[in-house]
Amino acid sequence: MQPRTTVQPPSSGRSLEHPARDAIRLEDVLHALSDPMRMRVVRTLAGETGELSCSVFDLPVSKSTTTHHFRVLRECGVINQIYRGTAKMNALRREDLDALFPGLLDSVLRAAADQDLRLGRDGG
Amino acid sequence: MQPRTTVQPPSSGRSLEHPARDAIRLEDVLHALSDPMRMRVVRTLAGETGELSCSVFDLPVSKSTTTHHFRVLRECGVINQIYRGTAKMNALRREDLDALFPGLLDSVLRAAADQDLRLGRDGG
DNA sequence: GTCAAATTACGAAGATCCTCGTACAATGGG
DNA sequence: CCCATTGTACGAGGATCTTCGTAATTTGAC
């Protein structure tokens, strides 16, 4: 078997720009989370430990729009994106967000879950 | 003569519509807080125990725009507004927000304060 | 090389948002 | 009653946002 030393082969030469941790702005994060589609993405990512490709999200919008929302999330520092083959993997920047805004992400996620229960989605 | 049981005379006949607690939506609150002017208002209100009139806020925008921002905050359930004479008093709906979104307001306020320090506003 | 899968880029339509100025309304004091 | 104070209503301009369809790009498999 091959060594495969690196855990994750970054795969391709395509690169994606991400803001450094210190460049992340609270107002941008709040704006990003104020969109239902993006909130849905973030909530799904928060329930996963690893990465998810864009295609596993079945948002009720076109693929172009989905691409747009993922870019907004990346450019404001909420998610990390990396190409692996033809897929683009996504992960929450939980460490960075928790370091910058302690407790914010968790309270937002909890508020979203509570609201779903209250309004009768999912849990009823 | 009338009993006048209520503590605060509402002063005028002008009334303002507020969403009930259960009608407050997380996405609307996040959107409201994503604007720097409105965040400034909320942070100022959070530092006060009582009410503040609109005029004590010296936002770097016109009076029309100030009115607009206060209305957005009221209509999404973040603040409570009431007329007292010629003034309009504002207060955070802290109880409602804390009940609906535990910890959210506090973490947002803390994040805003931290970011100000980090970016060199105020504290330096 | 060819092909399918995943995603982007581009341009555009429509909606919403932030901002403003000006004219107007409500209140309380003299 | 007159007036100053406080805030609103009513557009309107300009920016940004959400959404889309179609053409193009990148990658991995055969």
Image: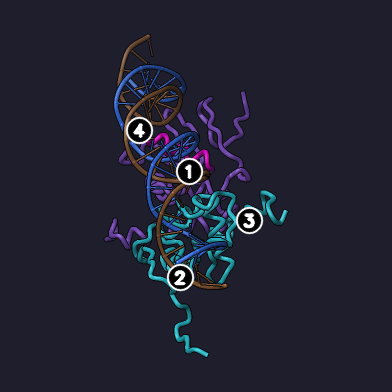
Chain colours: A cyan, B purple, C blue, D brown
Q: Eyeballing the image, is A58 above or below D17?
A: below
At label 3, counting other C-alpha atoms closer than 10 Å, the crowd grade (few under 14, some 14-19, many 20 or more) is: some
Picture disc at residue B91: 1
Q: Amino acid at mark 2?
A: Glu
Q: Chain of mark 1?
A: B
Q: Which residue is mark 4?
A: B63
Picture disc at residue A95: 2
Q: Which residue is mark 3?
A: A114
Horizontally, is B59 left or right of C14 in the view?
left
- Which residue is nearer to you in this view: A44 or D21? D21
Identify the element where label 3 is drawn.
helix
Q: Chain of mark 4?
A: B
Residue B88: x percent and y percent? 44, 33
Asked if both marks, 1 and 4, belong to the same chain, the answer given is: yes
Query: Is residue B48 visible in this depiction of the protein?
Result: no
Identify the element where label 4 is drawn.
helix
Q: Eyeballing the image, is A95 above or below A41?
A: below
In the picture, the quarter occupied by the C terminus of chain B is: bottom left
- Which numbered disc, 3 or 2, marks the residue closer to the eye? 2
Q: Amino acid at mark 4?
A: Lys
